[in-house]
Amino acid sequence: MRIGCPTEIKNHEYRVGLTPESARELVLRGNEVWIQSGAGLGIGATDDQYRAAGATIVDGPDPIFAECEMVVKVKEPQAGERAKLREGQLLYTYLHLAPDPEQTADLVKSGVTAIAYETVTGPNNSLPLLKPMSQVAGRMSIQAGASALEKAHGGRGVLLGGVPGVLPGRVMVIGGGVVGFNAAQMAVGLGADVTILDRDPEVLERLGTHFESRAKTRFSNMANIEQMIGEAELVIGAVLIPGAAAPKLVTREMLPLMKPGAVLVDVAIDQGGCFETSKPTTHAEPTYVIDNIVHYCVANMPGAVARTSTYALNNVTLPHALRMAELGWKEALRQNAHLAEGLNVHAGKVTYKAVADELGYDYLPTADALA
Ligand SMILES: NC(=O)C1=CN([C@@H]2O[C@H](COP(=O)(O)OP(=O)(O)OC[C@H]3O[C@@H](n4cnc5c(N)ncnc54)[C@H](O)[C@@H]3O)[C@@H](O)[C@H]2O)C=CC1
Ligand SMILES: CC(=O)C(=O)O
Ligand SMILES: [Mg+2]
């Protein structure tokens, strides 16, 4: 199969879909790999490293979109990229369609077959192609929040760990999955006063067993969120209903309950955000202030630590890419029900139920798309 990897063009996105090492694995199995010149520079990978791996370097993205059967990326295709997608082409990347009607309409119109990393499943309801980026974003969320809490950045002027004689800052993590767990780990490590809220009793139990007395857990409901929001210096939004738009758990009316200069970090912004006042920001301008509350809502947080993130992402995306290259996407999805969960759009139809429901499309079950 001919597989192409263009340079990412989203604001401050430095990751790349294929590392030179991944390109080599694909080439070793008889595939042709085309890499846009410069695509790897954000992780320090040169064109020569890709050439040494057996890849072909091409100028600009056009040859890749025009002539490759599978396009491997990181972030959702931007408008200019979507215009280049073709019927029968396979797109393998993060999509986050539920909060993104424009992207969904363009993908449907293009006829492309699109597999979203974030809805590919694994055993025990896990999301293995989202997990490494959630680990990165969860850890980064505390760094980002700590920085936003500094006075010069609009924050309350609180050091999360406190100092001897002064209490630490209070961190409230809403959603105790991969992002929430990693955020809590970092916050606990800094010495902050940490509470994690989730609505899944098994998740709460796991967190309680892991953190013991180093972090508190609490059931997530409106009463508890409303009561705790007034005490927190830093609130991390880390909920997910797979494939669906995030529920709004902190409303605009709740902001006056918060301490002036407190910080909201909405990691769930890629699924539309779990705070009513969240809107996507970029690494160039990551924060804004509403009602004295600092909001950080960067939708591609892992792009800032591109090297770590790209290698972590390739570790989990490559095995499926190799199988789709070997078997063709249809047969690979027939043989692997977890990968089949990744199919979001095919030949002009939405094939992921939560996306179809959210955006009002007819839903084509994946089984029908594979028939
Ligand atoms: N902004 C960024 O750069 C990045 C964003 N993300 C996003 O972060 C979000 C979280 O991802 P993961 O932690 O991997 O998901 P996950 O599935 O591991 O965890 C989500 C947790 O939210 C909980 N939850 C659902 N509804 C809730 C509610 N009403 N109250 C409290 N908890 C609730 C679930 O029980 C689950 O434990 C996703 O939207 C993901 O796409 C992930 C990586 C990077
Ligand atoms: C998951 C996601 O949105 C990211 O890694 O950018
Ligand atoms: Mg997006």
Image (spheres, rainbow, N blue to C red):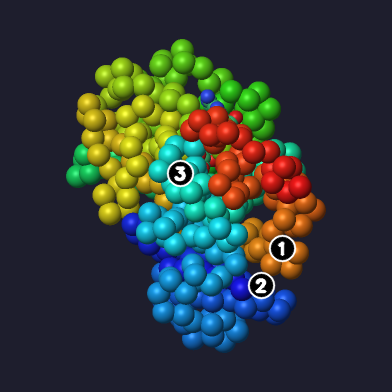
Task: Kindly give the residue lying farthest to the right in the view shown.
Answer: 335
Q: Which mark is residue 95?
A: none
The reply to whether callout 1 and callout 2 are in contact (CB within 8 Å) is: yes
Return the x and y of residue 42 as percentages of the image width and height: 41, 69
Q: Quadrant of residue 89?
A: bottom right
Dot 2 beta carbon under 8 Å from ligand 2: no
Please name the residue that numbered disc 2 is placed on: 1
Which residue type carries mark 3? Ala
Task: Kindly give the residue lying farthest to the left in the view shown.
Answer: 152
- Residue ID at (55%, 64%): 71
Q: Is residue 168 above or below residue 339?
A: above
- In the foreground, 320 or 285: 320
Please name the residue that numbered disc 1 is placed on: 328
Dot 1 beta carbon under 8 Å from ligand 2: no
Q: Of the residues under marks 1 and 2, which one precedes in the sequence?
A: 2
- Find numbered disc 1 in the image and state the secondary structure of the residue it sits on: loop
Q: Of the residues under marks 1 and 3, which one precedes in the sequence?
A: 3
Q: Is residue 98 shown left or right of residue 204? A: left
Q: Of the residues under marks 3 and 2, which one precedes in the sequence?
A: 2
Q: Which mark is residue 105?
A: 3
Distance of label 3 from label 2 (alpha carbons): 28 Å
Q: Is residue 171 above or below residue 102?
A: above
Distance of label 1 from label 2 (alpha carbons): 8 Å
Return the x and y of residue 147 as percentages of the image width and height: 31, 46
- Find numbered disc 3 in the image and state the secondary structure of the residue it sits on: helix
- Residue ID at (66%, 72%): 1
Which residue type carries mark 2? Met
